Image (tube, rainbow, N blue to C red):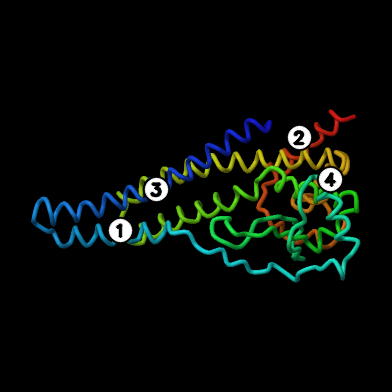
Amino acid sequence: MNRASLLARSIVAILLLIGFYVLALGIAAGLLWTVYAQVVIAERVFVKLALICVVLAGVILWSVLPRLDRFEPPGPQLTEHAHPQLFALIRDVADKTGQAMPREVYLVADVNAFVAQRGGIMGLFSRRVMGLGLPLLALLSVSELRAVLAHEFGHFHGGDTMLGPWIYKTRSAMARTIIALAERGSSIVRKPFEWYGNFFLGITHSISRAQELSADALAARVAGGRHLVSGLKATHAPHRGGRSRHPAGRYRQGRNRTRKAAHLRIEVTSRVRGAQL
């Protein structure tokens, strides 16, 4: 997927994000207006109906209220003083992708690497963090690790980490709203959120897949397609039933990628490498 198409899909995701809050506020306002209409227009209050409307409106408003992102370190923080070679590699990849260094780098227990904007509210006032799996560091060669790092910086390069918190927080708000309404037995009010939520998840899932492939393409240009392909194969080998080159391959992968997605990424990246040769 080219950048223009990805940008268009991202704009659609932002519009859908805004649409969710418009939907939530509109339904909450409609419920409260029902109470207002009973008191002011009809001058007759149905206590049970009014109470239900007020409670449901309160549930919706509380559920969609943005939460503060309380970041809990996923593992011990790595420092440049203690690991100069690793940070030199990270800095080199950051320079080649035109990105700033993450403010914090953590060691995690998964066969995984990630970047994110953490802290703040809805991505605002957040900071860049990176996580590197100890099993991953043992599993990959330096060239393959460079390719994996380039892929992660590709998410910074593409703006994925800026859009990500908004999408994630909106998904969480949708889930809170649907669960809270279900707990109160309100199927009629819940249905619009379920329909909208399913549509939003479908669109944002396709964007996430496209972002992964775009990051792969950048990593292939920066670190070489051959190293990226071998790194992907090595990383996903334990989850395809193959034998890992290191016992740490038995660790679960932190990203919840399906085997089909892994195969697709390897196939697409192989094509990128072929195009470069």
**Real-space CA distance between mark 2 and mark 1, rounded to the nearest whole angstrom:** 47 Å
Q: Earlier in the sequence, mark 2 or mark 4?
A: 4
Which residue is identified by label 1? 56
Residue 60 percent coordinates (x, y): 36, 57
Q: Quadrant of residue 159?
A: top right
Query: For the residue marked with disc 4, what is the amino acid?
Result: Lys
Residue 250 percent coordinates (x, y): 77, 60
Query: Which dot, 4 or 1, sits closer to the camera?
Result: 4
Lateral position of residue 43 relative to residue 24, left or right = left
Q: How many marks?
A: 4
**Real-space CA distance between mark 3 and mark 1, rounded to the nearest whole angstrom:** 13 Å
Query: For the residue marked with disc 2, what is the amino acid?
Result: Val
Residue 197 percent coordinates (x, y): 45, 46
On residue 136, the disc is none
Identity of the residue drawn at 91% across and 61% down: 85
Q: Do labels 4 and 1 touch, CB within 8 Å?
A: no
Q: Circle 3 — which element?
A: helix
Which residue is identified by label 4? 96
Residue 26 percent coordinates (x, y): 33, 47
On residue 268, the disc is 2
**Real-space CA distance between mark 2 and mark 3, rounded to the nearest whole angstrom:** 35 Å
**Could you say which is closer to the camera, residue 146 or residue 230?**
146
Q: Earlier in the sequence, mark 2 or mark 1?
A: 1
Query: For the residue marked with disc 3, what is the amino acid?
Result: Phe
**Real-space CA distance between mark 4 and mark 3, rounded to the nearest whole angstrom:** 43 Å
53 up-or-down from 17: above or below: below
On residue 193, the disc is 3
